[in-house]
Image (cartoon, coloured by chain):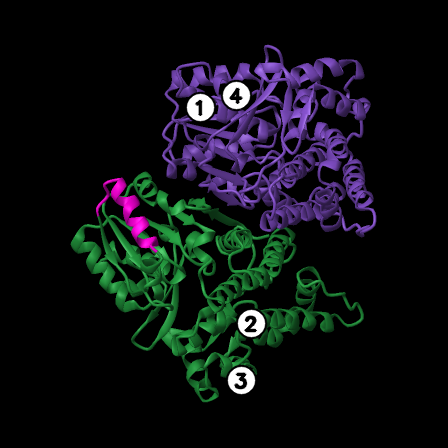
Chain colours: A green, B purple
Amino acid sequence: MENFTFYSPTCFVFGKDTESRAGALVKRFGGAKVLIHYGGGSAVRSGLLARVQTSLEAEKIPFCLLGGVQPNPRSGLVYEGIELCRKEGVDFVLAVGGGSVIDSAKAIAAGALYSGDFWDFYSGKPIEQALPVGTVLTIAAAGSEGSPDSVITREEGMFKRGASGDAIRPRFSILNPALTQTLPPYQTAAGITDIMAHLYERYLTNTKEVEVTDRLIEALLLTMIHEGPRVIRDPDNYDARANIMWAGMMAHNNSCGVGRSQDWNSHNIEHELSALYDCAHGAGLAVTMPAVFTYVMKHDVMRFAQAAVRIWGCQMDFAHPETTALEGIEKLRAFLTALGMPRNFAELGAKEEDIPRLVEALCRGDGRPGYISGFVRLDEKDCAEIYKMMV
Amino acid sequence: MENFTFYSPTCFVFGKDTESRAGALVKRFGGAKVLIHYGGGSAVRSGLLARVQTSLEAEKIPFCLLGGVQPNPRSGLVYEGIELCRKEGVDFVLAVGGGSVIDSAKAIAAGALYSGDFWDFYSGKPIEQALPVGTVLTIAAAGSEGSPDSVITREEGMFKRGASGDAIRPRFSILNPALTQTLPPYQTAAGITDIMAHLYERYLTNTKEVEVTDRLIEALLLTMIHEGPRVIRDPDNYDARANIMWAGMMAHNNSCGVGRSQDWNSHNIEHELSALYDCAHGAGLAVTMPAVFTYVMKHDVMRFAQAAVRIWGCQMDFAHPETTALEGIEKLRAFLTALGMPRNFAELGAKEEDIPRLVEALCRGDGRPGYISGFVRLDEKDCAEIYKMMV
């Protein structure tokens, strides 16, 4: 195991009706003037936004509002949010929504205390300070509610890039599984896929002898395999929603990813798809993961065989471990398809003729060196092959 | 799943040579005058204490020392530590040792800011404030490095009781697995048993539909089953030590126990043994757990069958689930015995004739109502039966 630091000081308030505690939590974590950041109409229509506002009013905490965050959140709204924070003297950013809203809130929080262009953080500059961030989560997916990460799409060039730093970890996150019961099945399934991808990205490691994190990742994947189909069949199943919601946080706060190298090639390859086609990130991952895993499988057949046996319940073919390894990847593909996720470019809305453009953006965009690396190093030719496998 | 709050703001610094960062971490978390609290000679002999002192000196942080913590830490030294903190103007308590040292440090930290008797906290009074605590951990066992808990033995009456509160969660914990390589096998095994007990106490729940935490607990138990025998055979196996150390923290910071009722009957029943006979807590648990589990098994046979199949790899006997449930308990017993743990009162140094006294202390001591309760409620007769099963 490699040396590491793990610091996850987010206060998670989990369960029914917990959004009513937003005001008290903002107060506890020092907020005196709040920006409430949110997305489209669902937080308004469901009455969630009004409940959050009421809870701030009960604590006599003034706030301003900035809605309109899109899935695959854009830099334009981040600049707007930064301006608003400065103008209004905001000292706390409260995200009410899913991963896109939270990621946008984190970018605003970091940018508000930085004199340069906030995009610097998404080009590799460390985030040293940020306004405190709180969240009221409405979808189990991105894990941004417990992570130090944020992904934003830059509108010039449509690059999707990530930034990370302890300063943007939420101070508190309110997780009410009941809020996810009204999600359309496709969004629920895309969230499940994203959570599973966060686990696979950590599972694909070159670090040896990491049994504890292997087992924790497997535990969370087994949970998703058990609960995923249940919430698709029965969207109002609170307990299944709750198990998925906690698994989604645990999948990405990195308690199960410490001390080991991680992959993140699937995420990077997918990011160009959702940047270009504005598809759901999870849907893009459903198409991307099986292709990437099949392409890189020979790098460590036994790791994929372990996944097949321990996660997917396959029988080990001791004479032909590759057969077992592939079977596990096929089980993942079939599982995601059964949830309603797309299988290929056509179902995703992507086009074969765009592959050169995707590869260029992936490997050269925003100063990249002509390759990406994680579990294995993938150059432009590899990436083109992988995109072709998805057609 | 039940509503819950999970807040674990400890900064974990994990890996080789990390004790050299103690001074920098004390500084980061605001310590200006430190009490270094430690146990017997091993921290001195190994040079660990000197390395920690050097790292404080490098940051120009003054400190005073209080050693002498015994396993099953006593109230007397806590009173001494509280006095010392007040006299010296200590504002940060640094524990260098195992769970006993950390628990004692937590008691001192809470008592130093309290005008009454610190034992009040161990009789149920909430801990509202405490000096900040940091730890340099030397054994994977109690999980106190990441928990809000502390257990102290009151010398008048030899009661062992626990206190809990976010204020005594460590601000940072330094976890260097190499420090555990020099432990005698018996202590290593007792630590492994304690970790497994923390997991079983959470596994035995009356809350339905808690797949995510079930799976996480199973993952950590599977890790212990894999790594436990490896460190007993090969004490210098750093990776196995590292997996156990992270599992030990995760087993008790409660990320795998949230939103579900828990048991803790085995711990309570054991505490009277280590209080009276001063045996290792883990050794006492090795004798206690199989007896308790066998006694309460019929309360939820399928839960014990699930443990047997998922944790111990038993084949499910669908016609006779009790057979499978019992087989899992027997596998636990055999596993602990193979690690070198005692099987009964005689091997532990306990005496059958003391059972009435143990039951009295357990069920009536320190204001208890004549029973203990967790997974099931156990009255004096039940507890006497369970102690008899251990003879």
Quote the CA–CA distance across marks 3 and 2. 13 Å
What residue does disc 1 label?
Answer: B110
Please give the chain letter of the residue carrying mark 3.
A
Q: Amino acid at mark 1?
A: Ala
Q: Marks 1 and 4: in contact by CB < 8 Å?
A: no
Q: Marks 2 and 4: in contact by CB < 8 Å?
A: no
What residue does disc 4 label?
Answer: B122
Quote the CA–CA distance across marks 3 and 4. 64 Å
What residue does disc 2 label?
Answer: A289
User: Is the residue B188 above or below the residue A207 in the image?
Assistant: above
Identify the residue at image location x=52%, y=21%.
Answer: B122
Q: Position of residue B310 (x, y in %)?
A: 72, 50
Quote the CA–CA distance across marks 4 and 2. 52 Å
Q: Nearer the viewer, residue B348 or B66?
A: B348
Q: Position of residue A214 (x, y in %)?
A: 62, 55
Res. A149 image quadrant = bottom left
Instruction: Name the secondary structure under disc 2.
Output: helix
Q: Nearer the viewer, residue B217 or A138?
A: A138
Q: Nearer the viewer, residue A39 or B156?
A: A39
Left or right side of A21 for B101 = right
Quote the CA–CA distance across marks 4 and 1. 11 Å
Q: Which residues are magenta?
A: A47-62
Q: Amino acid at mark 2?
A: Met
Please give the chain letter of the residue carrying mark 4.
B
Q: Position of residue B176 (x, y in %)?
A: 57, 42
Q: Residues within 10 Å of mark 4 (few under 14, many from 20)?
A: many
Q: Marks 2 and 3: in contact by CB < 8 Å?
A: no
What residue does disc 3 label?
Answer: A391
Left or right side of B105 for B199 = right
Tell me which numbered mark, 3 or 2, is placed earlier along the sequence: 2
